Image (spheres, grey):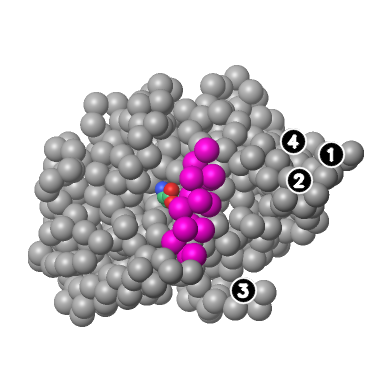
Amino acid sequence: AEEYLSQLYERIERGKLNAFTTLARETALREAKSFDQNPGKGLLAGVPIAIKECISTKGIESNCSSRILQGYIPPYDAHVIERLRAEGAIIMGKTNMDEFAMGTSTETSAFGPTRNPWDIDCVPGGSSGGSAACVAGGEAPCSLGSDTGGSVRCPASFCGIVGLKPTYGLVSRYGLIAYANSLEQIGPLTRTVKDTALLLEVIAGHDWRDSTSAEKSSYLPDLDRGIYGMKIGIPKEYFGEGVNEKVEKSVWDAISVLEGLGASWQEVSLPHTQYALAAYYVIAMSEASSNLARFDGLRYGLRQAGEDRDWHTTFSEIRSKGFGPEVKRRILLGTYALSAGYYGRYYLKALKVRTLIKEDFLQAFKQVDLLASPTMPIPAFRIGERINDPLSLYKADIFTVPINLAGVPAISLPCGFAGQLPIGLQLIGPHFGEAAVLQAAQAFE
Ligand code: GLN
């Protein structure tokens, strides 16, 4: 374990990916050494893992790739970290992300963009770009990310690896620094489906500290069951206009492969898809504006001694310096959507649309077992290409955000290439249908 881990650290240092923001080299190597002397029996005994910056790790900086939290060292572990440690995993370090998980490219990080290992001039996707790039680039065997509107699946798709967003409530959010808590889940990023199933087995399950968390089932025993007889729905709204031709072709090829493995497919409709982006961004920004109010420099981060003046001046100065432009934009828009007079027009409306979108999925799953679609309408784009055009970035989330609004699980799997850039296939299941999603993914792989 120690030798393997040292090799990973060497690779990180030699590389140009900027996937890691904080390395826990000393403690990790110590843990690896003690594992070598006395190997444990956990499901992940001696396995190094990289963790997204927004997941709290006791004694290791967790800064959400934001200046406002730079230097913040949590005094406790997130639930998922406790579970990983209990199974013998070794936390190697923290990975770069879009600031507070707001983004699709990892370019809004305060610590510079992460690069895509397949083409270092391209983005790795986001917001868990560091977690995906380090796995795809051979700097870590596996990682955890968080997915509020696609942040695990988008970078998995852009980096050609496997990424799963679990059903809302399957994995405890205790210790996940919140962006939009009604939408997000922590999920694994790995090179194989089996590794994703293994990590899910470890991190899922009830935790009394997250009131939305539920009991889990088992994912490993039936992983190889295959998909003979499974019915796969192809949502017609997820193909056509705006989808890159190569992406569309690779996904149809993947559907033929699933058919060859014994599944059947039929077209289905998710009629409210066109309203998903608008509803998602209103809800996510509203929740963000409320969640991020705690970063006032008094309780967390960035306050410098001797600088204190009256409350408003200090509060504004700290937040002006601490937050980047995308975070500020979202706090402003979210505050507006929640303000008296506009609440009913925007926020409440978005919640109603959310119910309709969830209803679309419930109806579809009366006809089919799983849904298949592209994860992203496009392959990775060049660094800098879209950063000044937030709307074009938001639009790229069109096939990932409805899944978070509905709370259902979805996985992204590599299914082809556009030139040298990977393409992702998204398989979506009904609530708590992870076992079937993983079986289909395993069969496809
Ligand atoms: N790109 C989406 C957003 O910016 C999703 C981010 C996420 O899942 N954290 O909100």
- Secondary structure at numbered mark 1: loop
What residue does disc 3 label? 210
Q: Main secondary structure of the magenta part?
A: helix
Instruction: Name above or below for residue 29 compared with residue 199.
Output: above
State the separation of the CA atoms marked 1 and 3.
37 Å
Query: Label 1, on which residue?
Result: 307
Residue 333 within the segment the image draws in magenta = yes
For label 1, count other residues whose C-alpha is less than 10 Å away and answer few (under 14), some (14-19) or many (20+): few
Residue under the point 46% across and 53% down: 333
What residue is pinned by disc 4?
25
Specify the label residue 172 is tagged with: none
Q: Nearer the viewer, mark 4 or mark 2?
A: 2
Residue at mark 2: 314
Residue at point 17% right, 67% down? 271
* Residue 357 image-quadrant placement: bottom left
**Mark 4: few, some, or many residues within 10 Å (few <14, many ≥20)?**
some
Amino acid type of disc 3? Asp
Mark 4 or mark 1: whose residue is earlier in sequence:
4
Of mark 2 and mark 1, the one earlier in the sequence is 1
What is the secondary structure assignment of the residue under circle 3?
A: loop
The reply to whether callout 4 and callout 2 are in contact (CB within 8 Å) is: no
Q: What amino acid is found at the position of numbered circle 1 in the picture?
A: Glu
Amino acid beneath label 2:
Thr
Label 2 and label 1: CA atoms lie apart by 8 Å
- In the visual, does 284 lie left or right of 416? right
State the image coordinates of residue 17 (x, y, percent, origin top left): 52, 26
Residue 51 image point, x, y percent: 61, 47
Q: Based on the displayed image, in which of its 4 quarters is residue 28 positioned?
A: top right
Measure the C-alpha gap from mark 3 to mark 4: 30 Å
Nearest to the eye among marks 3 and 4: give it: 3
